[in-house]
């Protein structure tokens, strides 16, 4: 038995399952790449202060879930719990916002870390694909991002994703609402922790899932009733654009999110086949974040889609992206001379764009044919001394068992033809 195991709340991605993860990441980023989003990659860790200020001092992410460390040099760092603050920090640091070409549109993909209580769909190391559009206040940009996420879900074949939509107002109307909500919450019978939360971040109380709290929240004032004229018009426009694009959404006036930086448009994608961890992605507008981390005013909007949970959603619906075969052709040499000839042929086959593998390790013919079958390849290329002397190689269809001799120097063309590539 191995001495070491993967740390609690983490899991390894290995073949064959890992292919689905790659396909999901690809499907999530493809619509972004077609819409002018450029790839961004930032470090896996940042100064703690970036998240404390950016995500919010009172959020669960910052108070309970960050993996923090002090370096030998005395820097306080944290493994990134989310992507937005890092990507905005990077864009500001590189002065992308001064390029004269706003919004700056970026997408990213990577690992994120939260010290959460692990359960199915909730891990301490997970994977997201995200997008940020920095430096423009335009309802069409909010709509664009939502549409691109929906395209990703559609291209994966997911049918049971619901889009929840809300507006959290801005610095004009939210404080007024916040006070009204606080006033209401003070009149409820809440435990000490929740009362404390109501004082620091009352909107988060609306998200409480406990039935006893939910019941009392039935008559709570809602942000939608308190939106200022600008926010209401902005939100109406986002809704109009989504409707015109044929996007179905549900207004969810109680949708708040676990991060403090959101303003105006907020949304979440949920999948009902996943149980408690149903959010497969979410995002919104964060007009104040740049200033919160020391930058200029840069109204922005973004989202992050969870790769792990999206794979679980595909499992739940029994659908999946079309995966190209890992190996299409498997070469089986018989004897030393054939090893050299077939090894060279495999390289040529690969250069022609066909996925090919080789019976490494000097295994015998029987074992090598077993490996060929297991690889999922459609064809085996088999050759021994006699074949080579005749300038030929045997091309075996692994499904039908039918075998034909083809000229060694025409084998690549023949394979390409049989695979329907030419
Ligand atoms: P958030 O930044 O919390 O809105 O996360 C965006 C998306 O990332 C969520 O909708 C989930 O799909 C995914 N996600 C967040 N936290 C976790 C986690 N601990 N484990 C797996 N996926 C997660």
Image (tube, helix red, strand yellow):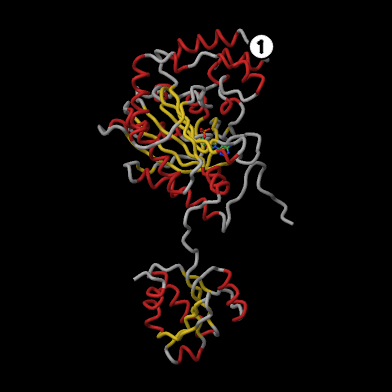
Question: Looking at the picture, does residue 350 appear above or below residue 73?
Answer: below
Residue 417 in picture, x, y percent from top left: 37, 75
> Which type of secondary structure does the marked residue at label 1 adopt?
loop
Q: Measuring from the top left, give residue 7's x and y in whole percent.
A: 66, 44
Q: Quadrant of residue 114?
A: top right
Q: Does the beta carbon of the residue at mark 1 sit less than 8 Å from ligand 1?
A: no
Q: Residue at x 39, y 30 (%)?
A: 301
Residue at 41% across / 27% down in the picture?
285
Tell me the quarter of the image containing the N terminus: bottom right
The answer to whether residue 285 is above or below residue 198 is below
Q: Nearer the viewer, residue 270 or 324?
A: 270
The furthest residue to the right: 1
Tell me, yes or no, if residue 124 can be seen here: no
The residue that disc 1 covers is 189
User: x, y (%) of residue 104?
Assistant: 32, 35
Q: Position of residue 334 (x, y in %)?
A: 55, 84
Horizontally, residue 214 falls left or right of residue 241, namely right
Q: Is residue 299 above or below residue 195?
A: below
- Depicted 121 relative to depicted 217: above or below: below
How many marks the image carries: the answer is 1
Mark 1: give few (<14), some (14-19) or many (20+) Cα within 10 Å: few
| Quarter of the figure that contains the C terminus | bottom left
Q: Is residue 157 visible?
A: yes
State the residue in front, 421 or 69.
421
Q: Nearer the viewer, residue 185 or 350?
A: 185
Q: Horizontally, is 66 left or right of 152 in the view?
A: right
Question: In the image, 350: left or right of 17?
Answer: left
Q: Is residue 106 rendered to the left or right of residue 315?
A: left
Q: Farthest residue in the left direction?
A: 100
Figure quadrant, ligand 1: top right
């Amino acid at each position: 038995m191995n001495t070491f195991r993967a740390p609690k709340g983490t899991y390894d991605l290995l073949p064959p399952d890992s292919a689905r993860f790659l396909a999901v990441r690809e499907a999530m980023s493809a619509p972004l790449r077609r819409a002018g989003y450029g790839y961004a990659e930032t470090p896996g860790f940042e100064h703690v202060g970036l998240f404390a200020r950016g995500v919010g001092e009172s959020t669960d992410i910052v108070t309970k879930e960050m993996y923090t460390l002090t370096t030998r040099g005395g820097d306080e760092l944290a493994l990134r719990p989310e992507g937005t603050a890092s990507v905005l920090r990077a864009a500001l640091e590189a002065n992308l916002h001064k390029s004269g070409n706003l919004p700056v549109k970026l997408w990213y993909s990577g690992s994120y870390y939260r010290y959460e209580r692990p359960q199915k769909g909730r891990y301490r190391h997970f994977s997201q694909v995200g997008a940020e559009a920095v430096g423009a206040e335009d309802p069409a940009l909010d709509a664009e991002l939502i549409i691109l996420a929906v395209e990703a879900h559609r291209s994966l074949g997911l049918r049971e994703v619901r889009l929840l939509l809300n507006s959290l107002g801005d610095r004009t109307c939210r404080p007024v609402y916040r006070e009204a909500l606080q006033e209401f919450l003070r009149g409820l019978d809440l435990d000490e922790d929740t009362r404390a939360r109501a004082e620091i971040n009352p909107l988060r109380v609306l998200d409480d899932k406990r039935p006893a709290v939910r019941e009392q929240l039935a008559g709570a004032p809602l942000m939608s009733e308190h939106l200022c004229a600008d926010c209401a018009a902005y939100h109406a426009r986002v809704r109009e654009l989504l409707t015109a694009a044929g996007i179905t959404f549900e207004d969810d006036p109680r949708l708040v999110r676990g991060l403090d930086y959101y303003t105006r448009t907020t949304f979440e994608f949920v999948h009902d086949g996943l149980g408690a961890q149903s959010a497969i992605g979410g995002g919104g507008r964060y007009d104040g974040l740049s200033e919160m981390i020391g930058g200029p005013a840069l109204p922005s909007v973004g989202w992050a889609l969870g790769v792990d949970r999206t794979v679980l959603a595909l499992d739940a619906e029994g659908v999946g992206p079309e995966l190209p075969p890992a190996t299409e052709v498997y070469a089986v040499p018989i004897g030393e001379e054939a090893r050299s000839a077939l090894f060279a042929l495999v390289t040529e086959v690969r250069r022609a764009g066909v996925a090919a593998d080789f019976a490494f390790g000097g295994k015998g013919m029987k074992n090598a044919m077993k490996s060929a079958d297991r690889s999922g390849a459609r064809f085996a290329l088999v050759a021994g001394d006699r074949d080579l002397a005749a300038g030929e190689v045997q091309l075996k269809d692994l499904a039908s068992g039918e075998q034909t001799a083809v000229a060694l120097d025409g084998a690549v063309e023949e394979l390409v033809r049989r695979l329907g590539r030419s």
